[in-house]
């Protein structure tokens, strides 16, 4: 469904223009919402209305606009977008168009062309041969590339929650601890089950609290049952997961007794050192050094892992990408075919993922700390549903619900 | 085990006094900890040591102190406590002794007498006939009652976590979200199971989030399985529990779909009105108006309920005690034979209960919001173990773990 | 401004009914918003529109509806509200109308009558002599009183944020820690200054953290400068305020050094006992026992205090109302002429106050803990603006800003 | 002060060995604490005591141990530490000694040598020519380097809070919102003032909430007044600071009105692009593109900035170090001469800084969100004092207090 806002001006009420236009839209099979009607306060004053018109496709919309034009309906005639050549590497021209995470079309050679690799806070690079447009981060700009500038010839089709009925209708928009979690988890299980059935890839973005709270065993089950195809995490998740496999502890705490191990604070560094000596996580799994846990399951079940470093990392593990520009690119390419995202107990990687995700990919964010979810919402990841709950019971229930669906 | 701190002074090192005293203690079967040794910086200066001595019982301690006295060991000779008569109703004499929640003895007629109804922030009333002492809140003082004043002749035997080995040793003292909850819940289940076996009564202190999060069904199972004998709550828990039974909602939200009911915000007031019309919760259960939920289970299984009002209550329900002094007295008498306390999702009633509980009753406090637990700890309920987790999954796991023990 | 939603049905587009109706409204000096237009998908199908019409007063609205009626505009003809007599004390008839905190009119003898003492979660009692309607809590119902039942003949005029422009326009609706607080505090100061100028009474609802964080000195200045006329609090604020005056501590912590006093945990109980011995806070101030602090300032400046008890209180202070039904009534009567409310660091009393406040009284709620504000919002106090910040700096800045306005 | 724990065994009580040893220590001018006395339960059984002995310097300690040795005092004779050569780049030998953030000595050639560049979670590399030891992160290990292995010949001298009297004595150890913040802030001002007087460098570790909350103006004053010499931050602080200078907004919100700007969500990306076009922050300041704010003040006053990237960055700004291993090295070298650390509103950079800091550098961490401070404490930064308060008022009070000291 494509929408366009048109503006009518003049004596549109008395003269039946409004009535006729609405009639046209309906006759054509379109839909409309009346956004605004300002009617002249005197008879001489002109009236004014803004109507959102919806049609099935851009082609149908073009036709409908043509028809409506006969009534003198006015709107800003679409013009081709303005293109400027980048004048340097690593920066856009000053007037560059800054992208959102919504579905975007650029008008070029009188046609509306859907943007590829949609991502917020990027610029749009034109590829003249194919007449395509692509989101590109500022670091990737090269001198001479044609960049879309200004707002002209750009159409953004916002993601509508209502279109997602059946997906998110069960979810209240507010972030609250006082909600029936079990119902919500059952619905998430349904979404994941459906996504897997459709052949979508599922992405887990996870923080080390998964291991600290004893939930790694549940995540392993999700991987074994084919519910996770991509994992975004940092050095900490990998490290404490391996620590748990090698020493039975996470941050030095025995998970089965909740007591501190002697010299337990060293375990995570020893885990890192052991894996570095083995040459990497994959190698450590293959050599039998790592025998269980999330990392082991990822290697065994070919889960695509992107481990992105951070400035607080010890080590890091060899697979951790230490350069952030490289890490973002790795996440970008891994995210392209993902159809559902589950983010758990990590602000850093959740925000990073939210930055890269198009608005139409459903994402669920779970954290026990409400400010994390507020932060995600503040940063524009509107499609994310936030759930305030505890990590380990969340995953336990999720596994149970998925089992009951299988 | 009773402990006493004794002070040695003089040339206790050179003259072998310290060595002899320690030898005496061990010969007698006692134990000691050397708390402090200050040794004179010149040969002329006197030395000084403080030793905590432990014996099996007060009687044995008296004997041991007698023996140690032969070496010239000094300590403040115990004198009988000072008593003053209350000079007015509803207030203590200025110099009154203010109680803690620790086991306390008062010396009277040269004997150490254990205080009854131990409770913090009370005074001690003497009953001369029986020569007993009892904790009494300031509101209950009557003119002419003999009240303990000053610090003389008072002995407090602090509750030691170490003595509670097997009970709380599995629990780290810090309040953190990043802990292996499952292990902790399994241990709580063990404690509850043991308490029930011993014939102790179990107290649940609960807030309305139990209903909002969909956990009422689990609490009903705990009641049915004999794991809850006393319930402390407020009007809100009762109201939303009945609301759920009558309308399927909690605060107007359908628990099975997490969506708002039409006019759902009225449901809680209609629930209150309906129960008031029936004459009370018990009557509504008996008449078949209320057919399920926590209130229903409490009535059916003779759980002792104390519903204490608060200034934010709508209604309230008829069983809710609106006068706080009366409510505290009801809680006091219901708490006397309780051996284990579970506090969930209510700051108000948890703090109120913590105020009344002696320090040696194990209590577990569960809340998703860490500041609640900090607040409890700040108010001196040291015996309370805090767990940051989500209410519904907590109860679900607890029921599962208890089932596996049964 | 009064609004009414009217429904048009029939061939309203083709036949120019819609155009004519809109024209009428404008000619009459009214305003409208088109809420919904469903237009028949075939020519035979009837269309349907819902329009919100606004007029200056109920009288003008009646006229306008009369005019519009000539075009066959349909709406549910207003009928008089249904009245039933209460069949028992302390409960409404089953079908009672449950109130909101919005401005409400009841139709009686063909006139729309504004409800008095507007308050949410009440019923409406009719007083036939004066033909007036009043909100009454369930506890106050007496057998034989005429009670409004059902939804017929009730009109609710929702409070519009937009009407409050100049009041709350500077405030974002979200609760977030990452906001420019200083700007917000300056605006609150402006609101308080304006309210005082208009002669409105200002209400402070406060918790003990005001004293714990060292902010009592700022609150005293607000009282001295005439910015607080009513105080709602509990036993804890009063107690720790007096404790600070008598002992220099709050919960046993010296405020000027942030260190624990010896036996400091007894101070609050000794403060309570001392005031009880004096006969009350007022008497203790008059006798010179209490020489400073918030309680002292309230007595000296005739601030109306309502201290409502709670089940966790020690003591309590003599002025504390221990019966919650009595306390709510005291708050109700004190709130009637209040024009601005500041709620700080107390969930319990803030929710209680929110329950009693009509929606059009501006209220600002300050707490460092975001869930408190979420809880307030969840309970329907929509008019409350939440600010996540720290208590002492908040009051310090507020006093500075008010000084700069004076 | 250097401490050593010695163990005495045998009939140390009866035979006066213990008395004589304590006498020796005092005669020598040393101090002791009796850690443990186990006394044989029968006369035949040997007794056992552990005593912590303290002397002024390692040299004096050696002498004292020699003296005590005459009484047959036993302790594990110090041996030189074990050294193994690294067998590969980027990893330690399996048995490596894992460092803490406490002052550490390594015994080599019969001397105790203080470790350089003390940092937790590193290994110790030996430099044979100078016979020195240095903390080295795992990434920096090169094949053939001599690495300390095992626990032998290592002495750790823990930082004692008590030694820091006058520094932190005013601070309660708990993290609580209910504390007198003003007193605490005054004391922090005192610490900063003293540090500057001593010629110590002061480090600010800051997050973007400094800008969002409107506190940048206060930080600029701290810089201008010489209270900040080093700044650790990320791309977000730099970006929103420049955004505020260029557009008047932070994350698109106008700080002086708390309202959203049109297209405000683009501002941060446009700020980044503008600075990238200028060649960097320094160049943008020099060219007059950036005319105020924190970045401007840092450039003008030669504050050493380390901006470390993260995976959620847009852009980033040219000065941001995108490789985390490089960023940690830059932080390491900038931290060496820092004498006081203030961490505000950033978990990521605070934990990263805590990882690098030796335990004896005083650090204050300010956040409105208590879990951040819990997280810091959980990760072993024991020297950090946590304060739960709001960022903007904190800085405002800090500037006022520092002005009153100047």
Image: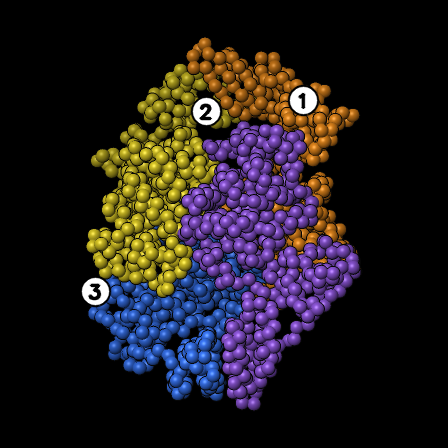
Chain colours: A purple, B yellow, C blue, D orange
Q: Is D112 or C198 nearer to us in this picture?
A: D112
What percent of the width, then of the height, locates residue B28?
38, 17
Please say whether residue B218 is visible from this viewpoint: yes
The residue labelled by disc 1 is: D81
Secondary structure at badge 2 equals: strand
Which labelled disc corresponds to residue C88? 3
For the residues labelled 2 and 1, the Cα–Cα distance comes to: 35 Å
Residue C234, position in %: x, y?
39, 55
- Tell which residue pokes out farthest to the bottom in this image: A44
Foreground residue among C238 and C158: C158
Q: Rate crowding at label 3 as few (under 14), some (14 to 19) or many (20 or more) other CA atoms within 10 Å.
A: some
In this rendering, which labeled residue sits more in front, label 2 or label 3?
3
Q: Mark 1 lies on which chain?
A: D
| Res A403 quadrant in image | top left
Tag 2 residue: B33
Residue at screen point 23% across, 60% down: B277
Chain on which label 3 sits: C
Do we see residue D194 in this rendering? no
Decide which of A16, B124 is in the foreground and name it: A16
State left or right for residue D302 relative to residue C342: right
Q: Quadrant of residue C290?
A: bottom left
* Pointer 2 local density, CA inside 10 Å: few below 14, some 14–19, many at least 20: some
Given residues B109 and B293, the one toward you in this image is: B293
Query: The residue marked by circle 2 belongs to what chain?
Result: B
Quarter of the C terminus of chain A within the rendering? top left
Q: Which percent across, then down, holds residue A242?
A: 57, 34
Residue C156 drawn at (x, y percent): 38, 73
| Tally of marks | 3
Q: In this view, does D242 lie to the left or right of A258?
A: right
> On the same chain: label 2 and label 1?
no
């Amino acid at each position: 469904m494509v929408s366009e806002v048109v503006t009518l001006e003049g004596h549109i009420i008395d003269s039946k223009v409004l009535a006729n236009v609405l009639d046209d839209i309906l006759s054509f099979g379109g839909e409309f919402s009346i956004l605004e009607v300002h009617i002249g306060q005197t008879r001489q004053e002109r009236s004014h209305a803004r109507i959102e018109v919806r049609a099935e496709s851009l082609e149908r919309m073009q036709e409908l606009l043509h028809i409506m034009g006969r009534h003198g309906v006015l709107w800003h005639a679409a013009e081709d977008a303005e293109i400027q050549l980048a004048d340097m590497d690593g920066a856009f021209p000053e007037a560059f168009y800054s992208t959102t995470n919504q579905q975007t079309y650029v008008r070029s050679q009188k046609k509306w062309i859907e943007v590829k690799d949609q991502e917020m806070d990027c610029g749009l690079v034109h590829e003249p041969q194919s007449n395509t447009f692509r989101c590109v981060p500022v670091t990737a700009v090269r001198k001479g590339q044609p960049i879309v500038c200004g707002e002209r010839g750009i159409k953004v089709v916002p993601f509508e929650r209502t279109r997602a009925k059946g997906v998110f209708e069960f979810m209240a928009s507010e972030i609250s601890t006082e909600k029936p979690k079990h119902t919500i988890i059952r619905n998430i299980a349904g979404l994941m089950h459906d996504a897997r059935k459709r052949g979508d890839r599922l992405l887990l973005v996870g923080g080390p609290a998964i291991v600290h709270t004893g939930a790694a065993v549940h995540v392993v089950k999700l991987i074994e049952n084919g519910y996770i195809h991509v994992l975004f995490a940092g050095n900490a998740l990998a490290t404490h997961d391996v620590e748990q496999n090698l020493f039975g502890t996470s941050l030095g705490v025995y998970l089965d007794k909740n007591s501190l191990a002697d010299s337990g604070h060293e375990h995570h560094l020893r885990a890192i050192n052991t894996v570095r000596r083995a040459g990497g996580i994959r190698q450590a799994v293959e050599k039998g050094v790592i025998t269980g846990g999330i990392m082991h399951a990822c290697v065994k079940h070919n889960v695509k892992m992107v481990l992105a470093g951070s400035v607080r990392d010890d080590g890091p593990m060899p697979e951790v990408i230490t350069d952030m520009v490289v890490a973002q690119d790795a996440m970008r390419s891994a995210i392209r075919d993902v159809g559902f995202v589950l983010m758990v107990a990590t602000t850093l990687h959740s925000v990073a993922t939210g930055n890269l995700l198009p608005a139409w990919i459903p994402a669920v964010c779970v954290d026990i700390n409400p400010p994390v979810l507020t932060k995600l919402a503040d940063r524009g990841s509107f499609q994310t549903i936030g759930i305030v709950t505890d990590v380990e019971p969340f995953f336990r229930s999720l596994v149970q619900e998925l089992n009951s669906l299988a």
